[in-house]
Amino acid sequence: MIKLAILASGSGSNAEKIMAHFQGSTKAEIALIASNKADAFVLERAKKFGVPTFTFSRKEMDAGVLLAKLQEEQIDWVILAGFLLKIPEALIRAFPNRMVNIHPALLPNYGGKGMYGHHVHEAVKAAGDTETGITIHLVNEHYDEGKIIFQAATPVTPEDTPDTIAAKVHALEHRYFPEVIESLVGTSTSSVTDVG
Ligand code: GRF
């Protein structure tokens, strides 16, 4: 069994789609949901699926507590799904090409410092872009610069607001993230082909 851990700081709608996708799989399981926020809704979602949870502070993560937990649980892959803290280098090095993030824009556009959550969609709206999308990428020491695994785009119309853009992006995330993970961790016979 391939063991996946999901790191999330907030609502966890992506985490929920991933847990649902792998429920009943004989090849991979979501073995842990870890969050830096003790009141994050993702923890409720985990309970619903009977997935163990782990919470930690930024200080503890920087001191290696999260890494120790992931190693103790023999986690093979780390999935970042709306995780807002900068990952310590030691943690990244412990999962070489085994850590994946989803970014709610078409990288390299709208990546880097300050570009998270609503800030991304507001920037897309302010720039008058005609499309946006999602990027699923491996994580290296330079957060949003790891190898791109998958991208999908959606049109942005003049009528769109940051909220409607966010909804379109979320729909893409929910549709693609679970199956891209499945393909990536090698539990699927078909590989995802529409890498943009
Ligand atoms: C997603 O848009 C993801 O791309 C971003 O954070 C958001 C998390 O949403 N990094 P949710 O918590 O999965 O609903």
Image (spheres, grey):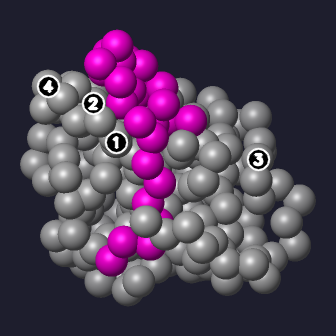
Identified at 87% across, 72% down, the residue is 26
The residue pinned by badge 4 equals 126
- Label pair 1/2, CB-CB below 8 angstroms: yes
Report how far apart the C-alphas of labels 2 and 3 lie in the structure.
27 Å
The residue pinned by badge 1 equals 132
Relative depth, front residue between 187 and 49: 187
User: Where, quadrant-wise, is the N terminus in this rendering?
Assistant: bottom right
Identified at 16% across, 70% down, the residue is 142
* Mark 1 or mark 2, whichever is nearer to me: 1
Kind of residue at badge 1: Thr
In the rendered structure, which segment of residues is drawn in magenta?
Answer: 147-171
Residue 166 appears in which quarter of the rendering? Answer: top left
Q: Which mark is residue 121?
A: 2
Residue 140 appears left or right of 44: left
x, y percent for residue 195 = 49, 69
Up the image or down, 58 lies above or below 149; here it is above
Report how far apart the C-alphas of labels 1 and 4 lie in the structure.
12 Å
Report how far apart the C-alphas of labels 2 and 4 lie in the structure.
9 Å
